[in-house]
Image (tube, rainbow, N blue to C red):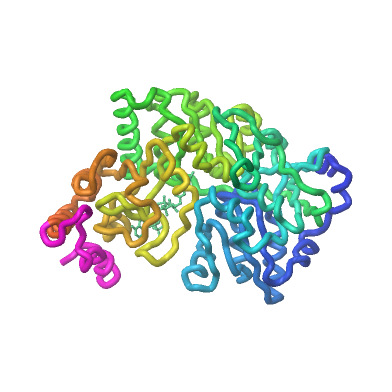
Amino acid sequence: LSKFIRNAAFLDKVVSAEEAASWIDDGMTLGMSGFTLFGEPKEFPMALAERGKKEKFKVNLFTGASMGPAADGSMAEAGIINLRFPYNANPILRKQINEGEAFYIDQHLSHNAEYVRQGVLPGIDYAIIEAAAITEDGEIIPTGSVGNSPIYVETAKHVIIEVNVSAPAAYEGMHDIYVPGPAGENARCDIPLCEISQRIGSKGIKVDPAKVRGIVISSQPDIPSPLFEPNEETQQIADNLLHFLHEEVRKGRLPNNLAPLQSGVGSVANAVLNGMKDSGFKDIIVASEVLQDGVFDLIDAGVVKFAAGTALSLSKKRVDSLAEDLEKYADKVVFRPQEISNHPELIRRLGVISFNTALEVDIYGNVNSTHVSGTHMMNGIGGSGDFARNARITMFVTQSTAKGGAISAIVPFVTHVDHTNHDVDVIITEQGYADLRGLAPRQAAEAIIENCMHPSFKQQAREYFEEAKAKRGGHTPHLLDKAFSWHINLAEKGTMKLD
Ligand code: 0RQ
């Protein structure tokens, strides 16, 4: 164990996961490491969930972002989550949230640490952090994500460290932990990062040893995400996105290595990253939140030269070769806290190109990323808003229809707004793309309907738009009695196609 816990003061704190779980009282707030299934403690949450099956209590669960079956999964199943913050993608917990059994605060991921720092949220009783090691100086070396761990450790009353002895040793040195102090004039200056590969912080999370109550040992491997192979539609979206970028280069607005790139997660993002292999673009910098398989494939192909993020999200194939890969990529990859990877100041300074996935988009370019039919939470806004508001070019991608063609992803009015039209530059579907930059709302509507909509909904959209202009007018013409008629039709008849 002394290989992993290299500071003697920590060695005598080793306890079982069950003992650590017994310290948690009803109503406490837990700040856990973990982001897109990487870097989360596993033994502790499972032990807590087991306790939850026998005793009645609930806790608030704060994390970096989505957690895997050990935390969100087992804790939701045991019914012990009261308030979840700031992102969830677990289906069991999603159901509880949508049925009002669990509370959920869905927030821009770069803002979380500021809320915690300001004391707006319940204070952290226990921070539970997965570690690859504890150094001689007593720093916690995180595993595959940094997320919000530094602020949870800094503000928690107590800390539990889950040392994962199966975590690759190569994690050490891959993190750059920079934590801004309190905000205020003459209190906080600029983040001194001009080049994405610079190091501005420490390699581990500093912790006051007196706060560390226990150390749990784990040997559970990282949890893979599904690998999304491109299909015809996602491939077409990727081709359209790459075509847009090629045009930007041709017009002299972007160089051939583009600008630092942020890619969303999921099927389209992977298809775009795949497509980049043969795109002719070179020396790309990735300045993202999540680094998924495609980024590493592009490093291998010599297309990406450096990648920064806050977390990994990898398929089984990449999880299996992780230890080897991390050594290979040690000088090409860095992980930072999510308040830094997603920081508006850096996104703006670096001139990031961003693309994320929308659930639905309206004819004026407002984007709903979170709420199905305006009410039911899908996952959360995640980091998409951090990038959308501040990027040099903000793109949203979506398939033009969902549920076998019954739903148009482009509607007269989105039922929930995550990204206002002011934040959205380009909409891309498998049908084509609409570059909204420099267009007024009426022009944007024409471009979105003609370039992005599925042919089976185009006429219906044209009719809405023409009627809205004729009957109501305005800068952004709408018919308030019909703006949600497609959604109402869907709820009543199972399709957005009007009679
Ligand atoms: O449902 O699985 O039941 O069939 O929504 O849709 O097309 O599989 O897309 O997996 O990429 O997810 C927006 C949810 C897209 C995701 C969202 C249904 C559809 C399917 C999923 P089924 P797809 P994806 C991180 C940035 C917000 C967070 C974010 C997301 C399911 O991308 O959570 O961007 N984004 N973080 O059938 C009803 C519609 C629908 C619909 C699709 N209009 N109405 N249902 N679906 N469109 C990265 C950073 O680095 C910042």
* Residue 385 visible, this angle: yes
| In this picture, residue 413 sits left or right of residue 388 | left
State the residue at coordinates (77%, 59%): 17
Q: Hey, which residue is sitting farthest front in the picture? A: 185
Of 458 and 252, nearer the camera is 252
| In this picture, residue 286 sits left or right of residue 46 | left
The overriding secondary structure of the stretch rendered in magenta is: loop
Whether residue 365 appears in magenta in the rendering, the answer is: no
| In this picture, residue 274 sits left or right of residue 322 | left
Q: Position of residue 73 (x, y in %)?
A: 59, 62
Give the position of the C terminus as an image quadrant. bottom left
Q: Hey, which residue is sitting farthest left in the picture? A: 470
State the residue at coordinates (23%, 45%): 440
State the residue at coordinates (76%, 57%): 158
Q: Position of residue 351 (x, y in %)?
A: 44, 33
477 above or below 146? below
Quarter of the figure with residue 279 = top left
Of 279 and 122, nearer the camera is 122
State the residue at coordinates (25%, 46%): 452
Of 337 and 272, nearer the camera is 337
* Residue 311 visible, this angle: no
- First to last magenta residue range: 470-499
Q: Position of residue 101 (x, y in %)?
A: 53, 73
| In this picture, residue 213 sits left or right of residue 193 | right
Give the position of the N terminus as an image quadrant. top right
Q: Position of residue 71 (x, y in %)?
A: 63, 59
Whether residue 485 appears in magenta in the rendering, the answer is: yes
